[in-house]
Image (tube, rainbow, N blue to C red):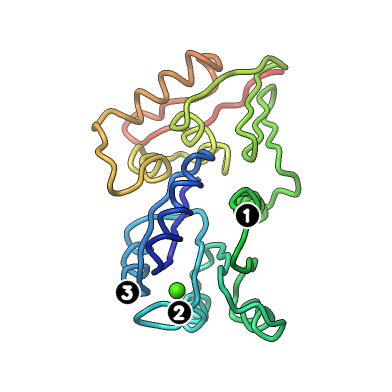
């Protein structure tokens, strides 16, 4: 799951990024509305954490514009403005959820997961795909009832493929899910993660569509 954090406070932004990464998310962090616009053009984020008081623009206005432009990425507003009219205004502007500072990091992570789940049209957090079971909040994976231990990157690849099973994802798209911009990435990194996933979850789970990318195959129970 690739999260964009828009927060101009250094301490808070760094804390959120580090904390969410420790919980298995891939994060990029920007400190202004301008940088956020650029980031969203560059990368297909799964979810956005938006601070309202930004140096160059009001976050709420920016969000309103996104929704008007048809940009549907799920957004969680993070703010010190906790009065009820502010919350209502935020939700009217097109926010999907609202969290008031100070907040608990594990609550933030859980809410982000639930936004991504809802955006994918799932009513439950746990994803079941044939004999595969994946809990994005606890990062627990099992195959035919047997727990499988996956690295953070492998989890991110699997989660991306599970978001729309059957859809082919190009290596570049998968890379977007797995790595932030500041991370150095070997050109064959995604292929290596796919190789490891096949080794751990069975050779037949992930299909290579030659010249295009990867997708999940239907696996018998
Ligand atoms: Ca701020």
| Proximity of marks 3 and 1: CB atoms separated by less than 8 Å | no
> Disc 2 on helix, strand or loop?
helix
Under 8 Å from ligand 1: the CB of mark 2? no
Where, by quadrant of the figure, is residue 188 drawn? top left
- Percent from the top left, x then y, of residue 82? 65, 77
Query: On the image, numbered disc 3 is attached to which residue?
Result: 34
Q: Residue at x 51, y 38 (%)?
A: 24
Residue in the foreground of this view, choosing between 106 and 187:
106
Determine crowd level at label 2: few under 14, some 14-19, many 20+ residues with C-alpha closer than 10 A: some
Q: Residue at x 75, y 45 (%)?
A: 124
- Percent from the top left, x then y, of residue 186? 24, 31
> Disc 1 on helix, strand or loop?
loop
Query: On the image, numbered disc 2 is attached to which residue?
Result: 62
* CA separation in Å, label 2 and label 1: 25 Å
Q: Which badge, 2 or 3, is on the more N-terminal residue? A: 3
Q: Which badge, 3 or 1, is on the more N-terminal residue? A: 3
Q: Which mark is residue 104?
A: 1
Determine crowd level at label 1: few under 14, some 14-19, many 20+ residues with C-alpha closer than 10 A: few
Residue in the foreground of this view, choosing between 213 and 183:
183
- Percent from the top left, x then y, of residue 147? 65, 18
Determine crowd level at label 3: few under 14, some 14-19, many 20+ residues with C-alpha closer than 10 A: some
Where ligand 1 lies, by quadrant? Answer: bottom left
Up-down relation of residue 61 to residue 169 (above or below): below
Q: Is residue 2 left or right of residue 35?
A: right
């Amino acid at each position: 799951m690739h999260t964009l954090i828009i927060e101009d406070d250094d301490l808070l932004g760094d804390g959120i990024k580090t904390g969410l990464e420790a919980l298995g998310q891939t994060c990029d962090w920007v400190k202004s509305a301008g940088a956020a616009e650029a980031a969203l053009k560059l990368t297909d984020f799964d979810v956005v954490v938006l601070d309202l008081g930004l140096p160059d623009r009001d976050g709420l206005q920016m969000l309103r514009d996104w929704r008007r432009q048809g940009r549907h990425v799920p957004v969680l507003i993070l703010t010190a403005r906790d009065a009820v009219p502010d919350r209502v205004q935020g939700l009217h502007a097109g926010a999907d959820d609202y969290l008031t500072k100070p907040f608990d990091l594990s609550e933030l992570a859980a809410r982000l997961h639930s936004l991504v789940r809802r955006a994918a049209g799932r009513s439950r957090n746990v994803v079941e795909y044939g004999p595969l079971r994946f809990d994005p909040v606890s990062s627990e994976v099992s195959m035919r009832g047997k727990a499988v231990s996956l690295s953070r990157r492998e989890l991110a690849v699997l989660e991306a493929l599970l978001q729309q099973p059957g859809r082919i994802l190009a290596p570049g798209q998968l890379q977007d899910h797995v790595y932030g911009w500041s991370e150095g990435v070997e050109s064959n990194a995604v292929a290596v993660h796919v190789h490891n996933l096949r080794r751990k979850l069975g050779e037949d789970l992930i299909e290579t569509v030659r010249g295009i990318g990867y997708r999940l195959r239907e696996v018998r129970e």
